Amino acid sequence: FEDAARGLCVGDRCEVTLPPEFAYGERREDLVLDIDAAKVPEGVTEGMTLQLSSGGRPVPARVIKVNDDGSIQLDANHKLAGETLKVEMTLAGFRALLAPAEPPPGMELATFAAGCFWGVELAFQRVPGVVQTNVGYAQGEQQAPEYEDICTGRTGHTEAVRVVFDPSAVTFEELLPVFWERVGKNATTLNKAGNDEGPQYRSGIYYHSEEQQRLAEKSALELQMKLGEPVVTEVKAAEPFWLAEDYHQQYLEKGGRNGQAQSAAKGCTDTIRCYG
């Protein structure tokens, strides 16, 4: 698809032909399985999909035949295995990879990392005076990283939220308590946020001005004195912010994993369900 899209303008259409090796693979006869009646669950009928296990991963298999003796035949090939696909594609637009380095006129930027970025973003969406939020990948070495790259923990990035706010309505200093509330006890645990572990979950405040640096360092020191143990949240100058994929943006507001949308209304105090 990437090869076909090169050179297209928005609105252009093209047809892409995908041979089996670039689609769902060749059909494999070794994935057609005969199952003894003793191993067949009750109520199985032809056309049903059963879940097998391979290396701990679920593998769907269709029931293609139910024999008189109660044994069945399963097909674990994809329905389109062995098929050459033809897909008509329209270029709808382009996804920006980098967030703007400068805020819109009259606005300011703030960048925070406090573990999984879904819940962090929703917390800032609810703050009056915040006009825009985006989740993405901050402070790493790899150019144009994708989520799968980040999950390896080897790109140097941390999951973060870029906040655009109106300083006449809310100040950077007033955003800091929102950040620390999301960090919680993990302010003292390096590369850990709840059950998530790895450098991609480290906490940080990435400043966009000397004043933000001063306020961030001051707040971290105050928290450290309050807790009586070292705060490991990093305070560093903001580096290029790579935007996460579209499906991550405003994830919890759109329903999260369970399809249950959470309110992003200004001033909302509902408990944030981190994964939806």
Image (cartoon, grey):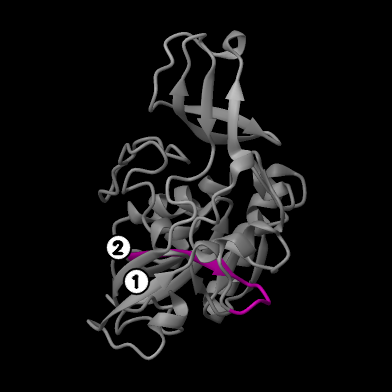
In terms of sequence position, does the residue under pointer 2 or pointer 1 come before the other? Answer: 2
The 10 Å Cα crowd at callout 2, few under 14, some 14 to 19, many 20 or more, is: some
What secondary structure is marked by label 1?
Answer: loop
Answer left or right for 190 relative to 133.
Answer: right
Count the numbered circles shown.
2
In front of the other: 135 or 176: 135
The 10 Å Cα crowd at callout 1, few under 14, some 14 to 19, many 20 or more, is: some
Measured as percent of width and height from the top left, residue 180 is found at: 55, 51
Measured as percent of width and height from the top left, residue 125 is found at: 34, 55
Q: Which amino acid is tagged 1? A: Pro
Res. 15 image quadrant:
bottom left
Position of residue 37 relative to residue 117, above or below, is above
CB of mark 2 within 8 Å of CB of mark 1?
yes
Res. 185 image quadrant:
top right
Res 203 seen here = no
Query: Where is mark 1, residue-wise?
Result: 167
Q: In the orientation shown, which residue stands out farthest toward the left?
A: 11
Residues under labels 2 and 1: Cα distance? 7 Å
Query: Where is mark 2, residue-wise?
Result: 129
Q: In the orientation shown, which residue stands out farthest toward the bottom?
A: 7
**Range covered by the magenta-colored residues:** 132-143
Query: Could you tell me which residue is drawn at 48 percent across and 67 percent down?
Result: 19
140 within the magenta span: yes
Q: Which amino acid is tagged 2? A: Gly
